[in-house]
Image: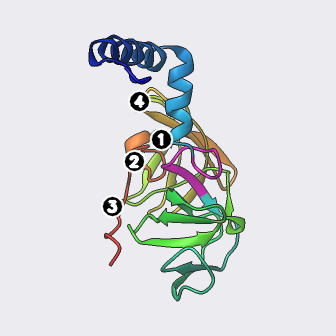
Amino acid sequence: MNGQVEPARRRPCVAAILLLATAFALSPLGAIAVADARRTPSGLPVPRYVTLKFGSVNARSGPGDDYPALWKYQVRGLPVQVIAESSEWRRICDPDRGVAWVHMRTTDGRRNVMRLAPTPVAVQSDPRSDSRTLALLRPRALAALQRCEAGWCRIKADGVTGWVPEAAMWGVDNRLQCVPAPAR
């Protein structure tokens, strides 16, 4: 046979390899391997929320200083959603649904939220709508996010700590907030 395997013997070998590959993929080790295939350069999930670290941050059309600046963010602590990343650059979605690239050094892992609706939202003493109102959070106001649970978020703004409905704030919904235009 000149060293070649007969076709009848190849089939069981292929079946055994497929069986082993399926077993591995369904095992905990296989799950880790699949998860590693989707790792980001930072090792953090995408999308995720961060804040802008400085009061002046250039928004660029691509991941590098050689790409033109589209605009300049002028709000320190602005919550943004990271929707893609390279080793040093983050593609972000801002509360107005603008999409741009910023350098990773201009972002901070601290979480803030923003009230986008044109009306204030009540900051409650407890995570219930019938609890005591501590303050009103104005439209476009920023607040530090402490945690969310059962549809309510604990925030801190101007020295007041309390609860607001999760749906009333931008910066907590883990779904992708912007769908970037395809590259040309």
- Is the Cβ of the residue at disc 3 closer than 8 Å to that at disc 1? no
Give the residues in magenta: 40-50
Name the foreground residue: 15 vs 167.
Answer: 15
Residue 65 lies in the magenta-colored region? no
* Mark 4 Cα-neighbour bin, 10 Å: few <14, some 14–19, many ≥20: few
Q: Is residue 85 above or below residue 1?
A: below
> Label 3, label 1: how many angstroms apart (C-alpha)?
27 Å
Q: Is residue 148 visible?
A: no
The location of residue 50, given as percent across then percent down, is: 60, 55
> Label 3, label 2: how many angstroms apart (C-alpha)?
21 Å
Q: Which residue is mark 1?
A: 164
Dot placed on the residue nearer the N-terminal end, 3 or 2? 2
- Is the Cβ of the residue at disc 2 closer than 8 Å to that at disc 1? yes
Residue 44 lies in the magenta-colored region? yes
Which amino acid type corresponds to the residue marked 2 in the rendered image?
Ala
The location of residue 164, given as percent across then percent down, is: 47, 41
Name the foreground residue: 164 vs 101.
Answer: 101
Which amino acid type corresponds to the residue marked 4 in the rendered image?
Asp
Q: Which residue is mark 2?
A: 168
Q: Is residue 112 above or below residue 75?
A: above
Name the foreground residue: 115 vs 58.
Answer: 58
In the displayed structure image, the side of residue 156 where residue 135 appears, left or right: left
Q: Which mark lies nearer to you, 3 or 2?
A: 3
Where residue 36 sits, quadrant-wise, is top right
Q: Which mark lies nearer to you, 1 or 4?
A: 1
Dot placed on the residue nearer the N-terminal end, 3 or 1? 1
> Label 3, label 4: how many angstroms apart (C-alpha)?
37 Å
